[in-house]
Image: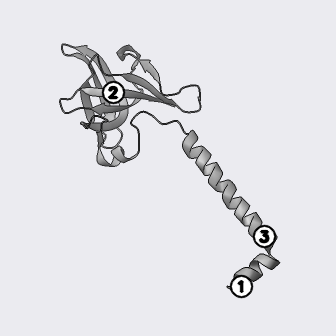
Amino acid sequence: MDWLGDLWYYHKGYVLAAGGVVLVLLVAAGIWWFGTERLPGYNIEPVLKNEYIEPGGAISRYATGIVISNEQSIMGPKISIQSDVTRQTITFFLPETAPVWLGLVIGNKAITGNERLTFADIKTGQRVAVFVGPVNKARRVNILKR
């Protein structure tokens, strides 16, 4: 333990400077982590598992992709997307009760992720994150813009 005492005695300034740099980096990382806007129910784990456990315990299939068609059908609004992961087409229905959120606009801090939209606001070519239940009906849709 003599070397630790010698280090402190002879190089106190360097030890304090190194500790200060580490502290500043940790504080900056904490500010970034807690300041990042998070989407409702969004994390990176569903991308790997392709499923999401809803707050009520139900399991949804999770997918992100580009809207290739949206149309009205007999059963209600129908949306088809091309999946980012598998490049397959995923078609699902959007019930009246399913919320459509404006999820994220990169570079625009005024968008909080709390803005509600309607089916009419979903356009072909938009990037979306969708949570689909077992009966092929969306539980919610997040529009992801850049």
Instruction: For the N terminus, give its image quadrant.
Output: bottom right
Q: Amino acid at mark 2?
A: Arg
Using residue 6 as the reference point, say whether residue 66 is left or right of it: left
What residue lies at 48% left-to-right and 36% top-to-bottom?
38
Label 1 vs label 2, nearer the camera: 1
Q: Of callouts 3 and 1, which one flags the residue occurring earlier in the amino acid sequence?
A: 1
Q: Is residue 145 above or below residue 45?
A: above
For the residue pair 102 and 36, the one nearer the viewer reads as: 36
Question: Residue 3, which numbered label?
Answer: 1
Residue indicated by mark 3: 14
What residue lies at 41% left-to-right and 16% top-to-bottom?
121
The answer to which quarter of the image holds residue 71 is top left
Label 3 vs label 1, nearer the camera: 1
Label 2 vs label 3, nearer the camera: 3
Q: Amino acid at mark 3?
A: Tyr
Residue indicated by mark 2: 140
Query: How would you rate the neighbour count of disc 2 (Cα within 10 Å): few for under 14, some for 14-19, many for 20 or more?
Result: many
For the residue pair 51 and 85, the one nearer the viewer reads as: 51
For the residue pair 15 and 120, the one nearer the viewer reads as: 15
What residue lies at 30% left-to-right and 36% top-to-bottom?
54
Q: Amino acid at mark 1?
A: Trp
